[in-house]
Image: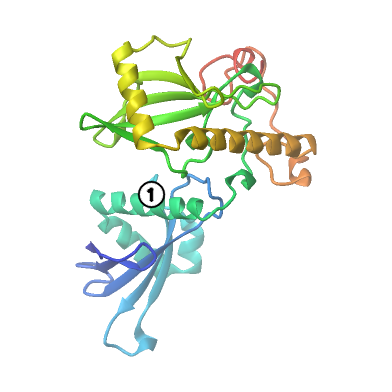
């Protein structure tokens, strides 16, 4: 059974003792590291490196590496290849996974999130990250969320009357629009889950420093709107400058995406040469949109 250790996320965070099977009675310590190099990847894959703790000579101790998916809760590496190349390591990985309970899986997921947030925080210029916007219909006025594009950036979170709310900030990033009023949606967080419907939706113009109700939503009661505006301003005193900077970063990310696209690099590819590989056939206008929205292609990404 795995026993979490009280160490920093870069140290050995887990002591694993097997109670049965091939590795019964043997003790290992593990440390974790990220697999994907992208600061915006949500694959959830962690590399766990185990070293055996034993009084035996070092030549008799064993070390094992494995890659786990904290999303699917499975071994992320191709099982057939690992079984062939490292049969003992494969058996170790299978025994470990069979021994992992829900508590440890949640710990691994939190560890992955913490490592990704640390990586994101170390990036001095988030605007330099390569982002693909091909799932967004920016030309039609779609607003794009900051943490939707940069999922490990710090979100806005406020407290109001002992309740916690996530403030999602979304932006117009169309090159032909020069608006300065991002949309702020306030969602109640209960038991670590975000509510589906916001309790308030407002726009803030960081140029004129004015608030307004969002025209496409039902306006919150004036008293409720005032409470959330006051709480947001109190808990984020520099929110005007933060919203302005986030909008600048979003526009820069989208402009860089358009430049790559214009250069011949198609969405989802890293180079012009890769993008010239045979592409999937474009859906018919009445076919379901491949983005998964459930709409017809002509009513969604095919517009």
Locate the C terminus by quadrant: top right
Q: In the rendered view, would you say 54 is above or below 197?
A: below
Q: Residue at x 52, y 46 (%)?
A: 41
Q: In the rendered view, would you say 43 is above or below 92?
A: above
Q: Position of residue 70 (x, y in %)?
A: 38, 49
Residue 278 seen anywhere in this rendered image of the structure: no
Q: In the rendered view, would you say 217 is above or below 153?
A: above
Q: Residues within 10 Å of mark 1 (few under 14, many from 20)?
A: many
Q: Residue at x 27, y 54 (%)?
A: 104
- Secondary structure, mark 1, is loop
> What is the image's colouring?
rainbow
Residue 184 seen anywhere in this rendered image of the structure: yes
Q: Would you say 185 lies left or right of 98 here?
A: right
Q: Between 149 and 108, which is closer to the camera in this rendering?
A: 149
Q: Would you say 23 lies left or right of 272 here?
A: left
Q: Which residue is mark 1?
A: 70
Q: Position of residue 186 (x, y in %)?
A: 36, 25
Snapshot quadrant of residue 24: bottom left
Locate the N terminus by quadrant: bottom left
């Amino acid at each position: 059974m795995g026993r979490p250790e009280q160490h920093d996320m870069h140290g050995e965070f887990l002591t694993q003792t097997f109670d049965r099977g091939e590795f019964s009675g043997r003790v290992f310590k593990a440390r974790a590291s990220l697999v994907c190099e992208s600061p915006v990847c949500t694959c959830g894959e962690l590399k766990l490196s185990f070293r055996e703790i034993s009084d035996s000579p070092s030549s008799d101790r064993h070390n094992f590496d494995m890659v786990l998916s904290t999303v699917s809760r499975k071994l992320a590496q191709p099982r057939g290849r690992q079984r062939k190349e490292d049969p003992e390591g494969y058996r170790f990985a299978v025994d470990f996974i069979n021994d992992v309970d829900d508590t440890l899986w949640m710990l691994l997921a939190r560890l992955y999130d913490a490592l990704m947030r640390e990586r994101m925080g170390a990036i001095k210029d988030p605007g330099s990250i390569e982002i693909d916007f091909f799932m967004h219909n920016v030309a039609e006025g779609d607003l794009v969320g900051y943490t939707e594009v940069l999922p490990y950036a710090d979100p806005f979170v406020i407290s109001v009357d002992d309740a916690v709310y996530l403030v999602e900030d979304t932006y117009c990033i169309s090159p032909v629009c020069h608006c300065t009023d991002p949309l702020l949606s306030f969602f109640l967080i209960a038991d670590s889950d975000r509510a589906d419907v916001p309790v308030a939706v407002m726009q803030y113009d960081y140029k004129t420093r004015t608030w307004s109700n969002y025209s496409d939503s039902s306006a919150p009661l004036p008293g409720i709107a005032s409470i959330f505006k006051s709480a947001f301003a109190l808990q984020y005193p520099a929110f005007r400058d933060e919203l302005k900077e986030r909008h600048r970063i979003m526009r820069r990310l989208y402009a860089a995406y358009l430049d790559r696209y214009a250069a011949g690099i198609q969405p989802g590819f890293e180079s012009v040469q890769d993008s010239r590989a045979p592409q999937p056939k474009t859906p018919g206008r009445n076919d379901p949109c491949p983005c998964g929205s459930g709409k017809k292609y002509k009513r969604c990404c095919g517009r």
